Image (cartoon, coloured by chain):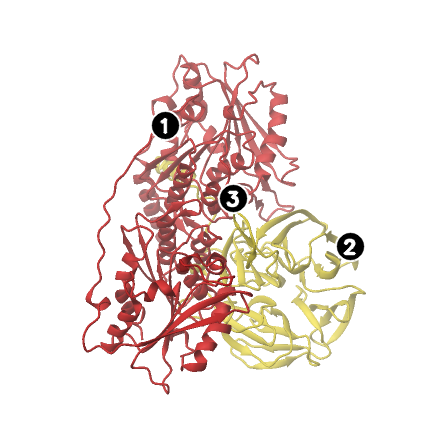
Amino acid sequence: MHKLFTLALAIGFVSFSQALDYKPGRLAERQEEAPKGKVIQSKWIESKHFPGTERDFWVYIPAQHDGNKPANLMVFQDGGGFIRENGHTRVPIVFDNLIHSGELPITVGLFVNPGIIPPAELGTQPRKNRAFEYDTVNSQYANFIINELLPHVVKKHRLNLSNKPSDHAICGNSSGGVAAFTAAWFRSDFFGGVISHIGSFTNIRGGFVYPALIRKTEKKDIRILLQEGHNDLNNLHGHWPLSNKQMAKALEFKGYDHKIVWGKGGHSGRHGGAIFPNSAKWIFEKKLKQKIDTVTTVIPDYSFTDDSKIHDGVPIGKITKHIHESKIFEGTKREYHIYVPSQYKSDTPACVMVFQDGHAFIKEDGDVRAQIVFDNLIHKGEIPVTIGIFVNPGHRGDKFPENRWRANNRSYEYDSLGDQYVRFLLEELLPTVGNKYNLSEKAKDRAICGASSGGICAFTAAWERPDAFSKVYSMIGSFTNIRGGNIYPSWIRKTAPKQIRIFLEDGENDLNNSHGDWPLGNLQMVEALKYMNWDYRFVYGKGKHNLRHGGVLLPEALRWLWADH
Amino acid sequence: MDRLTITLAGILLTNFAFTQDMPLSQVLMPGEDWELISHQNGFTDAPTADNKGNFYFSDMQSDQGLFKIAPQGKVIHYLKRATGISGMKFGPNGKLYACRAKAREVVEINPINNEIKVLANDVRPNDLVITHKGYLYFTETPKKQVTFINTKTGKIIVADKGINAPNGICLSPDQGTLVVSDFKGKHCWAFRIETDGTLQYKQPYMTMRRKPDPTKHGILPNFQSSCKGDGMITDAYGRYFVATELGVQYFDPIGRISGVIPGPIGIKGITSVTFAGRNMEYMHITCFDKVYRMKTKTRGILYQDGPQNYPPKLQK
């Protein structure tokens, strides 16, 4: 007991020392001249949208509300925390002061707690509905507020509310923050402003999808303020700071009115509370000034090490070219090359490494030159005797495209989640190669590699079949929403770790497009792998979306991947 | 001291210490993996445990029916004539309650004299639970129905209609909440158990992870409509476990998916999950012809022991 108490104190003080930096400011202190609005507390027990739930809620009506001029509205999740005059945000005091000074329009506040379904009997626990209401990605909570609770409040207190979405904002902390965004996202016909503090844009119940949704959905008329702390949570549900970064990046990409306020805090409402007076003013401001930052970066010239160069006396492996017609990807053809090192002996099973977009990895003057790297490392005994299979993506049609990256079945094969591509490898391609060469069947002898969509493809293959591939090298991997690959960090955090060794490479200047932000996608992967104690390495350079850095790193990646051999 | 208390309370309130997170690191034990404990069966299901930690399961295709494994023991036959059982639990009175799917009956078996009493016939039972009050709930998968038998009075009523394929069924540790998995849908559904045994406030409280469906493509990836949610069990901390085609998935007490534990490589599927063992620390799964167990950091509970407070107090 004593130990527990000490621990609680220690945790308390860590949070406390962080929290000390942020305090409610002058505008959250009572000013005598500002008239006090009314706060009315009630209970809501007959919910149609969430049957069986009960909850407290509060209505704040400014003294200046006289029913003649339509008022603005701000809704708060976890309302009980925002209404308290000694709490983290102290909204009634802030509103009194700002409305009095004319800095904020007359604004009604609706402060709502999450529901609970009380127990039927003493001694049993209530069913807590907070995560269900706040973290679920759908319109249910917004509809509850807009169609159920608000009409009651308007009627009961004879409120005159503006009907413009830009006059309606919604605010919350943590899951209440993602709930605010969700409400506006699904009901942008009603909510035009979102204030999210330490928002849970993570995988509590799927909320990590918003950056992807924002990028691929027609821009909605919503203004968003995000507050986030560099020391916020990193747990089974996700990485809060990275996820908020992804939100801001997506909003920026799509041209939303938004801002993100970074602090040093952890998962606490204090920073959001401290800046709230400015946030409230900003969210209802009529016109915003646009600010455009331009950043120039210098990308280093990545150059090959000796291991990627041809040396006299090093035996050269044999490369043969083949064509495969697929059954699983019916109607497609693809070229592939087999690299067989000169050290290969047919009585000893060879290790295997499969490269997606194979053409790019064995191009003689290319950015990778894997065959030379294999020759050198096998000769030096730094990696085992390995047969390389360099397979192109499938293509439908009579002629392969000049640019082999443009094979028309590539995205479907590489970016899709699920086991169909690895089945193609295990049921079609490897058995075909295995008819000619003695390939090891053991997972520890088999590696898979690719770049961009080929990178995520390599990961997907090992994820689905860790019994078939235990080593992965992903260059500039597309852990973005081309076809849902941004889900992996969320899955990794909530799946028993798999026996896979993975080397990842990406660059700060990698892509940022409608599918996502590549650097943030890779950083999310790395944080998730770290959180679950996977066997991984990550090299983060400055490069763009090309194979240069990843190619230069191939010898290092291979040595590391086979170091356990 | 007063100030300290206030400060601590303030910190708790501002730090959103609402619910305990329940990551896999609290369940998985380093170095532990699935261990095969029975094989060459037909179709295994209905795993359960008694209060000595003994583990029981059914082979629905065997003439023998039920099997028992003591914590460190071998597989032995258990009871006679108890064949074709797809779900079973011991009741608070020591009797074994079972769904006999093929015989279309729910039965009460007295393990002492092997007497079998039929509680309901002409039903389509799949799996069941029984509370400390003797309230028995069983899923009738093809009828999309959960049925309630008050074993004290013998009264049988329809408790719920409408889940696509109600299959697994379990209780919160305090026995106030009933949860049912859907074999042909994405949710596990929560109900409040009323004092008279009826069910109220049905809610799709838990959403299971499903396999992707790459043939359909939208802005976000599509997932299959179900992951074959099957047998369920709870642990002492209030986690809900469900057997699915992706492995054993578990949810925290507020319905948030918190972990997926894939089954052993090469199995045909997982039909159910339960805890057994001397300290109830072994997770057991029935996988068609095979049965496996894995030592965990958590521990199961036995509904027959009555309502439990959860999460449990720390042990000294």
Left or right, residue B107 beside residue A49: right
Where residue B157 is drawn, which disc sits there? 2
Query: Separation of disc 2 and disc 3 at Cα?
Result: 35 Å
| Residue nearest the viewer, comparing B179 with A259 | A259
On the image, the x and y values in percent for residue A483 come to 49, 53
Left or right, residue A312 beside residue B180: left
Please report, as a chain letter, where disc 1 is located. Answer: A
Which corner quadrant of the image does residue B267 belong to? bottom right
Dot 1 corresponds to which residue?
A290
Q: Is residue B154 above or below residue A86?
A: below
Please report, as a chain letter, where disc 3 is located. Answer: A
Disc 2 with disc 3 on a shared chain: no
Q: Secondary structure at mark 3?
A: loop
Dot 3 corresponds to which residue?
A135
**Three-letter amino acid code of the residue under disc 1:** Gln
Q: Secondary structure at mark 1?
A: loop
Please identify the quadrant where the C terminus of chain B is shown.
Answer: bottom left
Q: Is residue A35 above or below residue A123?
A: above
Which corner quadrant of the image does residue A533 belong to? bottom left
